[in-house]
Image (tube, helix red, strand yellow):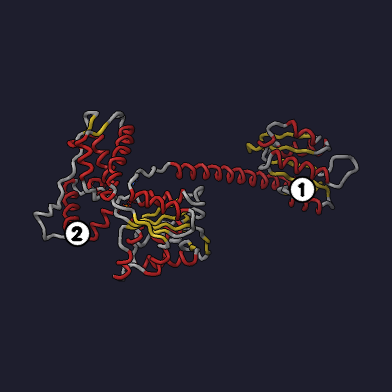
Amino acid sequence: MNQGKILVIDDKKSVLSALELLLQSEYKTLTTLANPNGITSISDLKTYNVILLDMNFSAGVNTGNEGFFWLKRIKKLAPDTSIIMMTAYGDVELAVRALKEGATDFILKPWENNKLLSTVRAAYQLQQSRKEVSHLKQKTKHLKQLINKSKTPIIGNSKAINQVLKITRKVAKTKANILITGENGTGKELIAQAIHNGSSRKDEVLVAVDMGAITESLFASELFGHTKGAFTDAHGDRAGKFETANGGTLFLDEIGNLSLALQAKLLAVLQNRVVFRVGSNTPIPVDIRLVCATNCNLEQMVEEGLFREDLLYRINTIQIEVPPLRSRDDDIFLLAEYFLNSYANKYGKSGLKLNASAKKKLQNHQWPGNIRELQHTIERGVILSEHNILTSNDFVFKKQAFSVTQEMNITLDDMEKTMIENALIKHEQNFSAAAHQLGITRQTLYNKIKRYGI
Ligand SMILES: Nc1ncnc2c1ncn2[C@@H]1O[C@H](COP(=O)(O)OP(=O)(O)OP(=O)(O)O)[C@@H](O)[C@H]1O
């Protein structure tokens, strides 16, 4: 038996009992009302799935006006409930008007039982779908708020970061496409989030895609989506990142890692503002604000023929350069304190403090992995600390391969390669651990391994 709740309102007792008999075999709750005024005393009217409502109640009146009056009233009291109007033969015009005013369907009297049952079933299904859509909408709104709220604050008060934040606030409000450049771990993704949060799209989502992590073969399906059966593993229809970001911001990280072939595909979508899911010819319009980031020098890559000039022009209406941590001296200590407090909380070690030697050591380090490296250094220090006061001994930097005085004739690339090799040996080829030690993401590590042929 269906769990649905049905209400029948008709002034004729014979109609009420006939419908009660017919519908109670299929629906759990069936209520009848001979006088429509009674709806005002039904406190849980909203919980009814379907209401069958007669058009005329006063004897001799068949204008349908009463029906319209109650239709309007019920729509106000129970906006999601499906309403089926019941009208006599010849009143089809009235029924059509009722549909325009919000009724779900109509039934002509006298009815055929089977037809009436299928009309009620369809109205019930429609009400269920409407309820589901409105739940999903509420859930999505809540999730979007959570996603946007749970972001890390941008810590820093150095001249360099304040300048970046000033530009960020200014451009956030515009529609301009933004390119964020800077070394790994400088906080480019946080700046992208700040642009989104400061824009008119802030109630929608920011969808981040690591372009370095997407393989050539998965690019189209990840970004543009696919239809069921488009390829062997496409078991169902799936929206791509462009569609998911619709109305919001699309953040394409590591854009410099895209091959020329994929750059062409991306450019086509940015130019036409429509995507085609893999396996479909139907264009889907997308409205996104584009923010890209890279640690590569794209101008130089253009000169070397590695990056399309037309794509660069499309993505870098405004360019924001995030400075490395070593040029943000004032921020090292602020950030260290911030991470110290958050990891102390996380690991239940409240009250941790840095002593002067620790501060000096952190201040003097060059931070090649920038804020990510600092963050991991503090996390390690907090985990391993045995006292409330952390000293310089609690912060151990790996022996640095770049002893420039001893090996003057090696290049920066050689040094980086050696550091990566050492980290991989030390962590027995565990990429996550090696990346963590080096203060870079796993993906960046992959890219570098590929680049250096390690
Ligand atoms: N100003 C800041 N305040 C607090 N945390 C920060 C700040 N800048 C960066 N972080 C933290 O440092 C880490 C690295 O930041 P983020 O991922 O934004 O850098 P990125 O430049 O995008 O790195 P990559 O180039 O490797 O993708 C993150 O955990 C981020 O939360």
The CA distance from mark 2 to mark 1 is: 79 Å
Question: Of 414 and 336, which appears nearest the observer?
Answer: 336
At 26% across and 32% down in the image, what residue appears?
A: 353
Going by the numbered disc 2, the residue's amino acid type is Asp
Residue 392: horizontal and vertical position, in percent?
A: 19, 37
- What quarter of the picture does the N terminus occupy? top right
- Residue 413: give its label: 2
At 29% across and 42% down in the image, what residue appears?
A: 375
Q: How many labels does the image show?
A: 2
Q: Does the residue labelled 2 lie within 8 Å of ligand 1?
A: no
Residue 138: horizontal and vertical position, in percent?
A: 55, 42
Which callout, 2 or 1, points at the residue further toward the start of the chain?
1
Side (left or right) of 149 relative to 38: left
At 58% across and 46% down in the image, what residue appears?
A: 133
Q: Does the residue labelled 1 lie within 8 Å of ligand 1?
A: no
Going by the numbered disc 1, the residue's amino acid type is Ile
Question: Of 142 and 133, which appears nearest the observer?
Answer: 142
